[in-house]
């Protein structure tokens, strides 16, 4: 069965463990964020993440994932790179870059998955706006993560938030359920129709992850078979949290 169809409702105990995983994942991302300075290499960022993961006795589900196996614990994307960038010891950050970091943490058999984008030093007003819109789109999606709503309500909220601000949201890469595996159902696209899709109920845990592009929504994959870039070379950004649907407010699991 494909991952999109494996929907697992979590108990309160499972969600508690995922909250711990999310807390550790947030600490990992914070340790990477401190290093976003000109001259740091993307391999330095991965090393910092691995050190923080190790200090909590955890590993990332990214390492060894897929074909060809992903070689690092985080993905690092610069400027037009949107997702799945491979850290490299010769790739240095420069003043004015925007960098997207995605990390997962496996803790007591459960996964937390989260990402952020940030600038290196001074960034352009256009880049600043891109970051704000992408993070805003994530929170617009989270606001829909309530019992009784549908996955299409989340997708529509993200799409409307981005497009009403003149930017573009990816069609190919989606949010996803997360739990014992990094990818479970339901799949939650970043664009869609309100009122459609799976009915949300307490115990669903979903990673929402809007990826926003300035030029068009088109992307392509580089010859390394991992790095996804905007087709037109325009800037992109990516924010992600793992969130639980509860009886009440959405519960963001991947925060400190
Ligand atoms: Mg992620
Ligand atoms: Mg994800």
Image (cartoon, grey):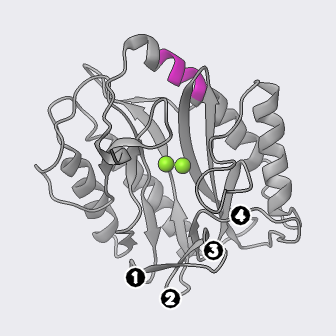
Check disc 4 and report the residue beneath it. Answer: 86
Rendered image quadrant of residue 191: bottom left
1 or 3: tag closer to the N-terminus: 3
Identity of the residue drawn at 79% across and 47% down: 34
Q: Measured along the vertical axis of the image, is residue 136 above or below residue 212? A: above
User: Which span of residues is magenta-colored?
Assistant: 16-21
Badge 4, how many Cα within 10 Å: few under 14, some, many 20+? many
> Which numbered disc, 4 or 2, marks the residue that appears first in the sequence?
4
Instruction: Pinpoint residue 136: horizontal percent, then vertical percent.
Output: 41, 53
Give SS at disc 4. Answer: loop
Distance CA(mark 1)–CA(mark 2): 7 Å
Q: Which labelled disc corresponds to residue 216?
A: 1
Determine which of the numbered discs, if any, sits on residue 79 in the image: 3
Image quadrant holding the N terminus, namely: top left
SS assignment at label 1: loop
Mark number displayed over residue 206: none
Distance (Cα) linking label 3 and label 4: 14 Å
Q: Residue at 84% across / 48% down in the picture?
A: 47
């Amino acid at each position: 069965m494909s991952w999109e169809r494996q929907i697992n409702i979590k108990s309160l105990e499972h969600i508690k463990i995922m909250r711990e995983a999310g807390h550790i994942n947030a600490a990992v991302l914070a340790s990477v964020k401190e290093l976003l300075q000109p001259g740091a290499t993307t391999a330095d960022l991965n090393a910092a993440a691995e050190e923080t993961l190790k200090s909590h006795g955890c590993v990332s589900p990214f390492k060894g994932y897929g074909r060809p196996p992903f070689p690092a614990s985080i993905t690092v994307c610069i400027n037009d790179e949107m997702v799945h960038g491979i850290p490299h010891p010769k790739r240095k950050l420069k003043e004015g870059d925007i960098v997207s970091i995605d990390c997962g943490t496996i803790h007591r058999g459960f996964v937390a998955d989260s990402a952020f984008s940030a600038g290196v030093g001074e960034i352009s007003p256009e880049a600043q706006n891109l970051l704000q819109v992408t993070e805003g789109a994530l929170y617009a999606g989270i606001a829909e993560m309530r019992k009784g709503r549908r996955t299409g309500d989340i997708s529509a909220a993200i799409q409307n938030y981005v497009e009403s601000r003149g930017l573009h949201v990816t069609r190919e890469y989606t949010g996803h359920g997360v739990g014992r595996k990094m990818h479970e159902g339901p799949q939650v696209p970043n664009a869609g129709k309100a009122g459609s899709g799976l009915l949300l109920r307490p115990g669903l845990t979903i990673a929402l992850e809007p990826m926003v592009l300035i030029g068009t929504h088109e992307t392509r994959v580089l010859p390394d078979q991992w790095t996804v870039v905007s087709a037109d070379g325009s800037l992109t950004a990516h924010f992600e949290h793992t969130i639980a649907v509860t009886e009440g407010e959405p519960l963001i699991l991947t925060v400190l």
